[in-house]
Image (tube, rainbow, N blue to C red):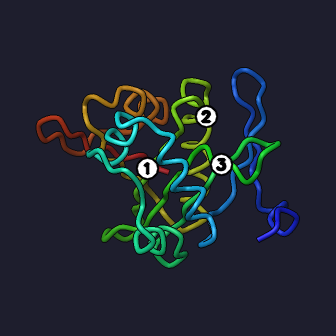
């Protein structure tokens, strides 16, 4: 879909260093740039996001992530390079009515600049729009940045099983 057709659906985020980014809902045609995002992310970043060293997303997985009935996937780009995806945010439906699941993957070179916090805050708006009253996140104890981000959003622990924390943000 051409950028002009998506302009009204873009959410602007300015990073702590003044860099502008744009976030929009993902489309099926975004699979290749999302796979490139995964290739640019370190094994460590992918392991923190997926709890395993997943190298990418298959076409079948992408169909699920980009299917509006299953939830909302957002992609983020630099403002000046809207074809270059630097982050993916998922707000997916769960088996619990009104509870969405939050997950974020940010390219390593774009981390620690305020993007994760801004994406999580935007995800809460998207979750409310989608009818959720809470967002759940499953995070390993080693994922300090995500745990810190969730703490800023007043996430409460639901369960801790060994190194895995289940947290919930009430919307």
Residue at left offset 27%, top offset 28%: 142
Q: Residue furthest right?
A: 4
Q: Tell me, for residue 103, which label it has, or none.
A: 1
Disc 3 vs disc 2: which is toward the camera? 3
Q: Nearer the viewer, residue 128 or 64?
A: 64
Disc 1 vs disc 3: which is toward the camera? 3
Asked if labels 2 and 3 touch by Cβ distance under 8 angstroms, the answer is: yes
Question: In the picture provided, is 162 more to the left or to the right than 14?
Answer: left
Q: In the image, residue 94 lies at what x, y percent?
A: 35, 67
- The residue indicated by pointer 2 is 115
**In which image quadrant can residue 28 be found?**
bottom right
Q: Tell me, for residue 68, which label it has, or none.
A: none
Q: Residue furthest left?
A: 162
- The residue indicated by pointer 3 is 76
* N-terminal label among 2 and 1: 1
Element at label 2:
helix
The residues tagged by marks 3 and 2 sit, at their Cα atoms, a distance apart of: 9 Å
Q: Badge 3 local density, few (<14 within 10 Å), some, or many (20+)?
A: many
Q: In the image, residue 8 lies at what x, y percent?
A: 84, 62
**In which image quadrant can residue 146 be found?**
top left
Residue at left offset 30%, top offset 41%: 139
* N-terminal label among 3 and 2: 3
């Amino acid at each position: 879909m051409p950028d002009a057709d998506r302009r009204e659906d873009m959410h602007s985020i300015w990073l702590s260093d003044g860099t502008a980014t744009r976030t929009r809902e993902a489309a099926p045609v975004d699979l290749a740039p999302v796979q490139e995002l995964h290739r640019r992310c370190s094994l460590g970043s992918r392991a923190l996001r997926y709890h395993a060293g997943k190298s990418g997303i298959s076409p079948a997985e992408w169909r699920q992530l980009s299917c509006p009935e299953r939830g909302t996937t957002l992609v983020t780009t630099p403002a000046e390079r809207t074809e270059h995806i630097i982050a993916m945010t998922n707000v997916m439906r769960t088996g619990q009515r009104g509870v969405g699941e939050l997950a974020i993957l940010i390219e390593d070179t774009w981390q620690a600049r305020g993007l994760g916090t801004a994406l999580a805050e935007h995800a809460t708006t998207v979750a409310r729009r989608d009818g959720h009253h809470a967002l759940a996140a499953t995070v390993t104890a080693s994922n300090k940045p995500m745990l810190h981000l969730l703490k800023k959003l007043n996430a409460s622990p639901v369960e801790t099983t060994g190194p895995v924390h289940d947290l919930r943000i009430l919307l």
